[in-house]
Image (cartoon, helix red, strand yellow):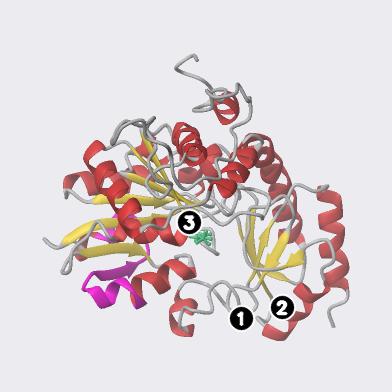
């Protein structure tokens, strides 16, 4: 296979050779826990499926290629992948994280790892100077999520990578909202890129999975040890489903971006809507950074209502018919959510308020349906508001 392939070709071919046993073109689901050895230690590269499984290996190679990474590791969920990253640290070590963070990540940092002595600082990351006062000799890691969830702030990966390099910190970028199609953090200087495969990569809302990609060999060895020792691996059936999703990632992302743009512009003109958060707007505070580091602006949009009434937001999301009211994002189908009571309910109200998660904030994951149907759906829900 040619070495320097473009994204769409890599999505379909990278790491995926016909099955050596049968010639099967699609990677088989190796639903096995163990592998025969000819003599003790004499095997074909697989011994036990927690340590390695051929379906999972194919996925790891394929996804690593999409992030232009040397190494990839698949986990049972996005949070399991995040957990593995923090297990690189020791008690007393400190992490500086964006304060506009996926709720489950915040919960894991503050309610699990904090108990084992890792200290977390949360701050805005609109500008790189916001983190400088928080860096100490104990700081070991920077945690970035961009675009952030749910108010679509953009963090300048290159600028934070520079600070990480100067201070010998590992920069981890949660790239879930962009997918590898829209953004490749390792190319911008990040040390580790993390994905909830559950979202855009899987793309069909039928798999929960996490992924880490990186170039550093020593760090990969440590993470692979953690993956095997902590044991939060994904199963072969899920690896197969993720591989199947990835084959259309580029096509789906293109449509997510087109539909996202149409819905964002429509919302912005609506007289009941207060703020619309979408990095594609030219007056988005970090639009220039988004334009520089992303290939498109994605299908994630949040908006708030004038008057900020919780009841009105509930009414609106309950009346949607094409959009489904549900947690999660990144699937082919459009979803709507209410961050304050759903995805971000685990973040205290005062913390939420600081980051714009107001009572009427609604988050949309714009799917790949016909954009006109999505807009008409929003229209009918709005028109039924008192
Ligand atoms: C969903 C999500 C996670 C967690 O991933 P799971 O697969 O649900 O464990 C982490 N970060 C972001 C940005 C997410 O959207």
Q: Magenta stretch?
A: 111-131
- Residue 326 in the image, given as x and y percentages of width and height: 69, 68
Which residue is drawn at the image coordinates 42% and 74% (left, top)?
107
Which residue is drawn at the image coordinates 69% and 48% (left, top)?
261
Q: Residue furthest left?
A: 137
Please state if 97 lies on the left or on the right of 148 as rendered. left
Please state if 30 lies on the left or on the right of 217 as rendered. right
**Could you tell which of marks 1 and 2 lies nearer the N-terminus?**
2
Please state if 327 lies on the left or on the right of 129 as rendered. right
- Residue 187 in the image, given as x and y percentages of width and height: 38, 34
Q: Do the residues labelled 1 and 2 touch (CB within 8 Å)?
A: yes
Residue at the disc numbered 2: 313
- Residue 304 in the image, given as x and y percentages of width and height: 65, 71
Residue at the disc numbered 1: 359
Q: Select label 3 or label 2 by which is in front.
A: 3
Report, in whole angstroms, how far the alpha carbon at label 3 lies from the one at label 1. 32 Å
Whether disc 2's CB lies below 8 Å from ligand 1 is answered no
Q: Are marks 3 and 1 in contact (CB under 8 Å)?
A: no
| SS class, disc 1 | loop
Residue 316 in view (yes/no): yes
**Could you tell which of marks 3 and 2 lies nearer the N-terminus?**
3
User: Does the stretch in magenta take in 124?
Assistant: yes
Q: Which of 57 and 47 is in front in this view?
A: 47
Which residue is drawn at the image coordinates 49% and 40% (left, top)?
183
Q: Which of 245 and 42 is in front in this view?
A: 42
> Which image quadrant: the C terminus?
bottom right
Please tell me the numbered disc located at residue 141: none
Which residue is drawn at the image coordinates 28% and 63% (left, top)?
96
Report, in whole angstroms, how far the alpha carbon at label 3 lies from the one at label 2. 33 Å
Please tell me the numbered disc located at residue 76: 3
**Could you tell which of marks 3 and 1 lies nearer the N-terminus?**
3
Q: In this view, does 20 lie above or below 209?
A: above
């Amino acid at each position: 296979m040619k070495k320097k392939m473009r994204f769409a070709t890599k999505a379909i071919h990278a790491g995926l050779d016909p099955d050596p046993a049968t010639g099967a073109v699609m990677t088989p689901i190796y639903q096995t826990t163990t592998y025969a050895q000819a003599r003790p230690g004499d095997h074909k590269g697989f011994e036990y499926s927690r340590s390695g499984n051929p379906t999972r290996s194919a996925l790891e190679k394929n996804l690593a290629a999409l992030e232009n990474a040397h190494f990839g590791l698949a986990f049972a969920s996005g949070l399991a992948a995040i957990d593995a990253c923090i297990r690189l640290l020791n008690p007393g070590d400190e992490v500086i994280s964006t304060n506009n963070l996926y709720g489950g990540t915040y919960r894991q940092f503050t309610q699990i790892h904090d108990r084992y002595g890792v200290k977390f600082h949360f701050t805005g990351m609109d500008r790189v100077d916001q983190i400088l006062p928080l860096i100490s000799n104990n700081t070991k890691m920077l945690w970035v999520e961009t675009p952030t969830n749910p108010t679509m702030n953009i963090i300048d990966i290159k600028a934070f990578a520079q600070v990480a390099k100067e201070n010998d910190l590992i920069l981890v970028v949660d790239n879930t909202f962009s997918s590898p199609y829209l953004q490749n953090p390792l190319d911008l200087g990040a040390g580790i890129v993390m994905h909830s495969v559950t979202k855009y990569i899987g793309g069909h809302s039928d798999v929960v999975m996490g992924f880490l990609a990186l170039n550093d060999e020593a760090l990969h060895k440590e993470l692979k040890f953690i993956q095997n020792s902590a044991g939060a691996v994904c199963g072969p059936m899920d690896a197969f489903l993720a591989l199947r999703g990835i084959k259309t990632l580029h096509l789906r992302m293109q449509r997510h971006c087109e539909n996202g743009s149409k819905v964002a512009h429509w919302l912005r003109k609506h007289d009941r809507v207060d703020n619309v958060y979408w990095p594609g707007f030219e007056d988005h505070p970090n639009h220039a950074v988004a334009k520089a580091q992303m290939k498109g602006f994605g299908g994630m949009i949040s908006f708030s209502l004038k008057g900020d009434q919780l009841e009105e937001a509930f009414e609106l999301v309950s009346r949607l018919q094409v959009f489904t009211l549900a947690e999660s994002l990144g699937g082919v189908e459009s979803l709507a959510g209410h961050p304050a009571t759903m995805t971000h309910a685990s973040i205290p109200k005062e913390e939420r308020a600081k980051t714009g998660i107001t009572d009427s904030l609604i988050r949309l994951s714009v799917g790949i349906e016909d954009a006109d149907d999505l807009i008409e759906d929003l229209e009918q829900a709005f028109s039924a508001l008192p």
